[in-house]
Image (cartoon, grey):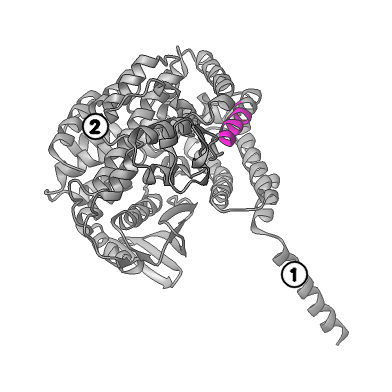
C-alpha cells in the first residue's frame, strides 16, 4: 500500500513539473543542449556523408522552425528572451558547422555527383559557407537592426499643426489659435480630414517620425554592410546581395521596377479613395466551406486532404503522405511552418489559422494564399531540408505558391471589379512597394539623391514630395530585406505571367509538378525553360511581364 501511495505521489509531482514548464522553456533547453556532431568517418562516399549530415542538420533546422513558430505569438519578456537566446545559439552552431573543413569538402564532392539532389545540396552548402560573416560583425548588425526596429515601432507622432484649418473638428485643442498638436491616429486623421494638403502634411511628417533616431544608426548599418560586400569583392552591398538571384544586378532590378511602375492614389489620399469606392461583390462564407471548395479543386493535382479530427488535416499527394495541417483560430488567415517535409526523413507539419467567417474579398483571398503556402511547404520533392526551403534564390522560391493561389482564386472567386476598393488597394500597395524597392536599392548602392527619388515618387503617385528619399527611415523592409525588397513583387509578377499564359491550356498538372514539386530538382532557369518551352533570360521575362500587365487588369 505504501509503495502504491508513493508511486501516485511521484507521478503527480512529475506531472505538475511537466505542466509547469512552458513549451518555450523546454525549447530553450533543447537549443542550449543541441550540438551538431560530425563523425570521424572518411569522405569516400559523398552520398552516405550527405545523408549523415542531413540527419544532424535536420534537428537544428526543426528547432529553428520551432523558434520562428513561437515568435509569432505575444509572449512575456522572459519567454521572448529565451527565444532570442535560442535563435542566437542555433545561428552560432550553424556558423561553426559551415566553417568546418569537412563540410566544405563535402559540398565540393556533392557538386560533382551524378544525382541532381546531391548536386543541388552541394550548391546550397557552398552558398551558405560563402555567405558567413564574423561573429563580431554579426553582433554589430544585430544590435544596430534592433535599435532601428525599435524606433520604427513607435507609432506615436508629435506634431504641431501650424494651420488651424488642418485640425479635425473633433479635436478639442483646435481652439488654440494658429497651432494645434496632432492628437489622432494617422489612419483616422487621413480618413476624416477632408483637406488634401493637410493630409499630405501629416502623412509626410509621419514617414519622418524616426529619422532623427535612425539616421545615424542606418548609416552605421550601411557601413557594416558595405564592409561585408568589400570583403567579398563587390563594389557595394546591393551588388553583393543580388549576386545569385534571378535578377542578379541592380540594373536588372531597376529594369523590372520601371516596367511595373504605374500611377496609383497618393498615400495621403488612399484612405479617402477607399472610403468612397464600392467593393467587389462577394458573399460572406464560412472558412471551412471555402476550404472544402479548395480541397475539391486540388483533386485535379491528385492532392487529397482528409480530416483526422476537427483540428488536424492529413495531406496526401497520390500515395505519398506529405504531413499534417493543424487548424486554429485567428483574425487573419495565416500559415506557419512547424516542421518542413523532407522525403525520406520526416513528414511536414504546418499551422493554418483563420477566422470562422470570411466576410470580404481580401480575407477569402488570404485564406486561399495561406493554404497554397501550406501545400508548398508540404509537397516539395527534395530529399534534403535545404533544397525544400531555400530554392535556387530568394527571389524565385515562392513563385509556385503564388501561381497556385492565382489558379485557385481564378476557380473560386469572382474577378475583381475595375475601380473597386480591392482594385485601388492592390494598385496602391504595389506602387508603394515599387517605390520602396527603388529606395532600398539606391540606399545600399550609396546613391540616394533627392531629385531622383522625388521623380520616382511622382511616377508612382503623381504627387510631389521633395523629401522622398527620406522614406528610407519609414519602413522595416530597409533592414529586413534590404536590396531584396523587390522580391515579392518579382515573384508575384512572374507567377501572374505564367498563370495568364497557361490558364486556358491543359497544362495545369505539368505546371503544378514543375513549380510545386520539382521532383527532378531542375534549376529555376530549367523550370522556366520547361514552362515557356524555350530558355528565357531575365530581360525577356521583364518585357513579357510588362506586356502581360498591359493586357490584364488586377
Q: Residue at x 25, y 62 (%)?
A: 299
In the image, taking residue 204 as reference, residue 539 lies left or right, namely: left
Q: Nearer the viewer, residue 49 or 168?
A: 168
* Left or right relative to 271: residue 531: left
Q: Residue furthest bottom?
A: 1
State the residue position of label 2: 263
Asked whether residue 126 appears in the rendered view, the answer is no
Please give the range of residues in magenta. 141-151
Of 45 and 61, the residue lying toward us: 61
Q: Determine whether 529 is above or below 242 in the image.
A: below
Instruction: Say if 282 sits above or below 546 in the image.
Output: below
* Picture quadrant of residue 13: bottom right
In space, the residues marked 1 and 2 are separated at their CA atoms by 61 Å
With respect to residue 102, does 335 lie above or below?
Answer: below
Image quadrant holding the C terminus, namely top left
Q: Position of residue 545 (x, y in %)?
A: 20, 32
For marks 1 and 2 on the same chain, the one whose residue lies earlier in the sequence? 1
The residue located at (54%, 35%) in the rendering is: 152
Main SS of the magenta segment? Answer: helix
**Residue 374 location (% of width, % of height):** 39, 54
Q: To which residue does mark 1 refer?
A: 16
110 lies above or below 189: above
* SS label for mark 1: helix
Q: Residue at x 36, y 47 (%)?
A: 381
Pointer 1 with pointer 2, Cβ within 8 A: no
Amino acid at each position: 500500500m505504501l509503495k502504491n501511495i508513493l508511486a501516485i505521489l511521484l507521478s503527480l509531482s512529475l506531472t505538475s513539473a511537466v505542466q509547469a514548464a512552458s513549451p518555450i522553456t523546454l525549447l530553450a533547453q533543447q537549443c542550449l543542449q543541441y550540438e551538431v556532431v560530425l563523425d570521424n568517418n572518411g569522405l569516400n562516399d559523398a552520398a552516405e556523408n550527405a545523408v549523415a549530415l542531413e540527419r544532424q542538420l535536420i534537428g537544428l533546422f526543426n528547432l529553428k522552425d520551432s523558434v520562428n513558430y513561437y515568435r509569432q505569438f505575444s509572449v512575456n519578456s522572459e519567454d521572448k528572451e529565451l527565444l532570442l537566446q535560442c535563435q542566437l545559439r542555433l545561428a552560432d552552431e550553424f556558423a561553426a558547422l559551415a566553417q568546418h573543413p569537412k563540410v566544405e569538402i563535402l559540398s565540393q564532392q556533392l557538386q560533382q555527383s551524378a544525382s541532381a539532389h546531391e548536386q543541388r545540396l552541394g550548391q546550397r552548402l557552398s552558398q551558405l559557407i560563402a555567405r558567413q560573416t564574423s561573429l563580431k560583425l554579426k553582433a554589430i548588425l544585430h544590435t544596430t537592426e534592433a535599435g532601428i526596429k525599435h524606433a520604427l515601432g513607435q507609432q506615436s507622432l508629435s506634431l504641431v499643426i501650424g494651420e488651424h484649418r488642418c485640425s479635425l473638428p473633433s479635436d478639442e485643442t483646435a481652439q488654440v489659435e494658429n497651432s494645434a498638436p496632432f492628437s489622432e491616429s494617422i489612419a483616422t486623421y487621413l480618413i476624416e480630414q477632408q483637406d488634401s494638403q493637410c493630409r499630405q502634411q501629416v502623412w509626410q511628417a509621419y514617414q519622418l517620425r524616426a529619422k532623427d533616431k535612425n539616421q545615424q544608426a542606418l548609416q552605421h548599418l550601411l557601413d557594416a554592410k558595405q564592409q561585408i560586400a568589400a570583403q567579398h569583392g563587390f563594389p557595394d552591398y546591393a551588388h553583393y546581395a543580388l549576386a545569385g538571384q534571378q535578377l542578379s544586378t541592380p540594373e536588372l532590378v531597376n529594369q523590372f521596377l520601371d516596367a511595373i511602375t504605374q500611377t496609383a492614389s497618393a498615400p495621403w489620399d488612399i484612405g479617402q479613395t477607399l472610403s468612397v469606392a464600392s467593393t467587389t461583390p462577394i458573399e460572406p462564407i464560412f472558412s471551412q466551406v471555402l476550404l472544402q471548395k479548395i480541397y475539391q479543386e486540388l483533386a485535379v493535382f491528385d492532392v487529397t486532404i482528409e480530416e483526422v479530427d476537427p483540428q488536424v488535416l492529413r495531406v496526401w499527394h497520390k500515395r505519398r503522405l506529405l504531413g499534417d495541417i493543424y487548424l486554429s483560430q485567428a483574425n487573419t488567415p495565416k500559415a506557419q511552418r512547424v516542421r518542413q517535409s523532407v522525403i525520406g526523413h520526416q513528414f511536414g507539419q504546418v499551422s493554418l489559422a483563420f477566422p470562422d467567417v470570411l466576410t470580404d474579398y481580401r480575407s477569402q483571398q488570404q485564406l486561399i494564399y495561406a493554404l497554397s503556402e501550406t501545400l508548398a511547404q508540404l509537397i516539395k520533392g527534395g530529399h534534403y531540408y535545404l533544397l525544400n526551403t531555400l530554392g535556387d534564390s530568394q527571389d524565385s522560391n515562392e513563385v509556385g505558391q503564388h501561381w497556385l493561389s492565382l489558379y485557385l482564386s481564378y476557380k473560386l472567386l469572382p474577378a475583381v471589379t475595375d475601380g473597386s476598393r480591392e482594385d485601388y488597394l492592390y494598385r496602391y500597395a504595389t506602387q508603394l512597394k515599387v517605390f520602396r524597392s527603388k529606395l532600398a536599392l539606391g540606399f545600399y548602392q550609396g546613391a540616394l539623391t533627392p531629385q531622383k527619388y522625388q521623380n520616382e515618387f511622382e511616377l508612382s503617385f503623381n504627387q510631389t514630395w521633395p523629401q522622398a528619399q527620406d522614406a528610407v527611415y519609414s519602413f522595416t523592409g530597409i533592414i529586413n530585406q534590404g536590396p531584396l525588397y523587390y522580391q515579392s513583387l518579382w515573384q508575384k509578377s512572374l507567377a501572374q505571367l505564367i498563370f495568364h499564359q497557361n490558364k486556358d491550356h491543359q497544362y495545369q498538372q505539368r505546371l503544378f509538378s514543375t513549380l510545386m514539386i520539382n521532383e527532378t530538382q531542375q534549376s529555376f532557369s530549367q523550370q522556366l525553360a520547361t514552362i515557356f518551352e524555350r530558355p528565357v533570360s531575365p530581360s525577356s521575362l521583364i518585357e513579357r511581364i510588362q506586356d502581360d500587365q498591359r493586357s490584364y487588369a488586377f
